[in-house]
C-alpha cells in the first residue's frame, strides 16, 4: 500500500465543474494510497465511484463538491474496514438514488459531509447516506437535505439495513447532524434503522444505536423510524419549517429495548408524536420515554396523540414501559398518552395542563396489568387496568377527572387532587375492588364522584360531599376525617360526620366535636361530656 496522501489532481482531475472527473477520482481511489485528498473545487462525476476490499482509508476534502450527473449510486464502499470520509459535499443534482453507500463494512467514520439534492424517477427508494450490514458506524456533523422520491414514494436521509446474508447494522452513533426536507409524506423518513425479525436469514440482535443531538426539519412522514432493537434517541430536535406536512410521527420506536429521552418536538400536525407500535403485532418490551417536550400547534382531521402505544382495539402488546417527566404543550391532542395493552407501565412526573391520558381498553381480553400512575398533572385519567395504582396526581378541568372502566379490578386510588371537573371521579359498571382513599375533591361542578360496580372501598377522602353510589351493600363508604385539636375547626372544608378530638380534655368538658353540617368550616357540635 502506498504511504501518505494521494491528490486527485495528480490523477488528472480538474475540479472545474465542467470536465468529467470520474476516471481521475476512480484512479485515485484504486491507487492504494491510505489517504485520498480532494482539493477545493467542483468535480463532475458521471459514473458510480467504488472502493472494494480496503482496510484503512481516508477520503477527505476542503469544502470540495462531488457533483453527480444521472448516477444511480455516487460513492460506494464494499467489504471495507476502517474507512473515514470527511469534509466533502455530495450533490445529486436530483438524479441519483444513493449518494454515499457502505455495504458489509466495519469501523466507518463519516464526518462533516453535505449530502443534498437526491432524487430519482425510478421505482427504487432514494437515500442520501446508506449502510447495509455494516458495524461500528459513526456519523457526525453532517447536513443531509432535499432527499425526494416522487415515484417510489420512499425516501430516507440515513438508512441502516441488513445485507443479503441477514447481517444487521450494529454499534451505531449519529451525532449532531441536520436532516432536512425528506419527502414525500407517503414515506419520507429522516433516519430508518431496519431489522425485520423473523424474515428468512435475518439475524436477530440489537443495533446498539445512539442518535444524539440531531436536528430533523420537515422530515415529511417521520424523523426517526427504528425497527432494530436497542435504539436511543437523545436530545434531538424535531420541527416544521414549512408547516405543510401532516406527519405520522417524530419518533417511531417499532422495537424493544429502546428509548426517547430529552427531545424537543414541535409540529403543526402529527398523528402520534412518539409512536411505539409494531406493524406485525410482535410484542415489544423495555421502552423508556423520558423528559421530552412535545407540542402540536394545529388541529388535524384525525386524532393526534402525544405518545401512542397502540390504537384502540389493538392486540399488539408492550411490557415494561416507563413514561416519565414529559411536558405536553397545547390542547390539540386527542390524548397525550395512550397505552393499550401490556404489563408493567409507569407513568410519573408528566405534565399536560389541558389534556389527559388513556391507559387500557374497555372490556377487552387484552388487558393492562400493573399500571402505576403517580405525581403527574393531567386534565383527566381514563383507566381500564388491573392490579394498578393511581396516586399523588393533580387532575384539573375536564369532564371526568378519573374515569375507571371495566376491566378495572384491584386498583388503589389515593392522595390525588381532583378539581374543577364536571364529575370528579366516575367508577363504571363491572369494575371490581377499587379502593378510593385520602383524595381531595375540590370545586367539581355536578358530582365529586359517581360510583358503580362492586366490592369498592371509599374512605378518608376530603371534600367528597357530592357522592352518587348505590345502596346495595357492594360499596363500603366511610369518608369521615378524624383530627385532634384544642377547639373545633374554624377553617377548611369538612363533611358531616368528621370528628375533632379534644387535645386538652378536662372535667366538665367534652371528648371532642362532630361536624353536623358540611361546609367551610361547617357546623360543629360537642359530643361526649366528661364528668366532673
Image (spheres, rainbow, N blue to C red):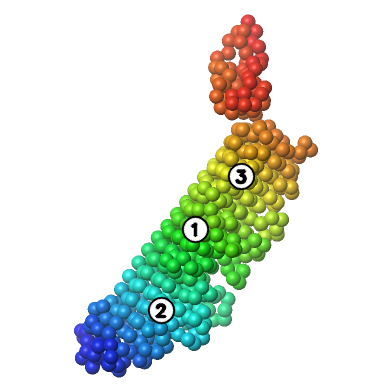
Sequence-earlier tag: 3 or 1? 1
Seen from the viewer's position, the closer of residues 277 and 120 is: 120
Query: Quadrant of residue 498 in the image?
Result: top right
The disc at residue 475 is: none
Q: Is 413 on the left-hand or right-hand side of 296?
A: right
Q: Is 211 on the left-hand or right-hand side of 446?
A: left
Q: Label 2: which residue?
A: 128
Q: Residues within 10 Å of mark 3 (few under 14, many from 20)?
A: many
The CA distance from mark 2 to mark 1 is 30 Å
Seen from the viewer's position, the closer of residues 121 and 77 is: 121
Does residue 274 appear anywhere in the picture? no
Q: Label 1: which residue?
A: 297
x, y percent for residue 107 = 35, 76
Q: Nearer the viewer, mark 3 or mark 1?
A: 1
| CB within 8 Å, label 3 to label 1 | no
> In terms of secondary structure, where does tag 1 sit?
loop
The disc at residue 401 is: 3
The CA distance from mark 3 to mark 2 is 48 Å
The mark total stands at: 3
Sequence-earlier tag: 2 or 1? 2
x, y percent for residue 471 = 77, 36
Query: Quadrant of residue 218 in the image?
Result: bottom left
Sequence-earlier tag: 3 or 2? 2
Quadrant containing the C terminus in the rendered view: top right
Amino acid at each position: 500500500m502506498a504511504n501518505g496522501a494521494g491528490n486527485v489532481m495528480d490523477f488528472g482531475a480538474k475540479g472545474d465543474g465542467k470536465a468529467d472527473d470520474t476516471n481521475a477520482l476512480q484512479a485515485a481511489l484504486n491507487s492504494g494510497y491510505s489517504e485520498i485528498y480532494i482539493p477545493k473545487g467542483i468535480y463532475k462525476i458521471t459514473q458510480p465511484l467504488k472502493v472494494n476490499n480496503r482496510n484503512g482509508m481516508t477520503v477527505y476534502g476542503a469544502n470540495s463538491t462531488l457533483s453527480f450527473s444521472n448516477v444511480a449510486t455516487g460513492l460506494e464502499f464494499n467489504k471495507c474496514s476502517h474507512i473515514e470520509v470527511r469534509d466533502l459535499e455530495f450533490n445529486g443534482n436530483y438524479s441519483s438514488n444513493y449518494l454515499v453507500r457502505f455495504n458489509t463494512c466495519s469501523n466507518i467514520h463519516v464526518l462533516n459531509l453535505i449530502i443534498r439534492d437526491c432524487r430519482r424517477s425510478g421505482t427504487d427508494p432514494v437515500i442520501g447516506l446508506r449502510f447495509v450490514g455494516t458495524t461500528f458506524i459513526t456519523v457526525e456533523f453532517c447536513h443531509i437535505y432535499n432527499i425526494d422520491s416522487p415515484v417510489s414514494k420512499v425516501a430516507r436521509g440515513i438508512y441502516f439495513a441488513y445485507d443479503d446474508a441477514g447481517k444487521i447494522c450494529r454499534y451505531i452513533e449519529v451525532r449532531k447532524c441536520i436532516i432536512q426536507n425528506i419527502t414525500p409524506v407517503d414515506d419520507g423518513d429522516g433516519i430508518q434503522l431496519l431489522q425485520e425479525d423473523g424474515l428468512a436469514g435475518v439475524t436477530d440482535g440489537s443495533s446498539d444505536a445512539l442518535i444524539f443531538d440531531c436536528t430533523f426539519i420537515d422530515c415529511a412522514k417521520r424523523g426517526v423510524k427504528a425497527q432494530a432493537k436497542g435504539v436511543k434517541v437523545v436530545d434531538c430536535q424535531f420541527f416544521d419549517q414549512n408547516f405543510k406536512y401532516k406527519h405520522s410521527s417524530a419518533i417511531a420506536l417499532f422495537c424493544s429495548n429502546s428509548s426517547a429521552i430529552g427531545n424537543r418536538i414541535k409540529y403543526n400536525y402529527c398523528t402520534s408524536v412518539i409512536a411505539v407500535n409494531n406493524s406485525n403485532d410482535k410484542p415489544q418490551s423495555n421502552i423508556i420515554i423520558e423528559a421530552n417536550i412535545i407540542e402540536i400547534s394545529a388541529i388535524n382531521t384525525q386524532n393526534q396523540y402525544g405518545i401512542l402505544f397502540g390504537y384502540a382495539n389493538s392486540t399488539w402488546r408492550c411490557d415494561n414501559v416507563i413514561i416519565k417527566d414529559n411536558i405536553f404543550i397545547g390542547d390539540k391532542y386527542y390524548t397525550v398518552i395512550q397505552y393499550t395493552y401490556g404489563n408493567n407501565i409507569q407513568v410519573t412526573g408528566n405534565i399536560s395542563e389541558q389534556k389527559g391520558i388513556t391507559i387500557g381498553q374497555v372490556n377487552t381480553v387484552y388487558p393492562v396489568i400493573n399500571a402505576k400512575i403517580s405525581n403527574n398533572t393531567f386534565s383527566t385519567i381514563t383507566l381500564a387496568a388491573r392490579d394498578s395504582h393511581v396516586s399523588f396526581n393533580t387532575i384539573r378541568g375536564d369532564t371526568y377527572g378519573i374515569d375507571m372502566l371495566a376491566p378495572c379490578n384491584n386498583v388503589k386510588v389515593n392522595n390525588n387532587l381532583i378539581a374543577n371537573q364536571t364529575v370528579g371521579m366516575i367508577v363504571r359498571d363491572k369494575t371490581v375492588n377499587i379502593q378510593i382513599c385520602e383524595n381531595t375533591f375540590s370545586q367539581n361542578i355536578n358530582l365529586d364522584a359517581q360510583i358503580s360496580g362492586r366490592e369498592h372501598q371509599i374512605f378518608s377522602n376530603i371534600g367528597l360531599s357530592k357522592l352518587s353510589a348505590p345502596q346495595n351493600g357492594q360499596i363500603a363508604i366511610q369518608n369521615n376525617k378524624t383530627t385532634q385539636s384544642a377547639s373545633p375547626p374554624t377553617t377548611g372544608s369538612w363533611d358531616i360526620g368528621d370528628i375533632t378530638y379534644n387535645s386538652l380534655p378536662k372535667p366538665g368538658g367534652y371528648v371532642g366535636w362532630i361536624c353536623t353540617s358540611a361546609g367551610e368550616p361547617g357546623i360543629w357540635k360537642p359530643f361526649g361530656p366528661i364528668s366532673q
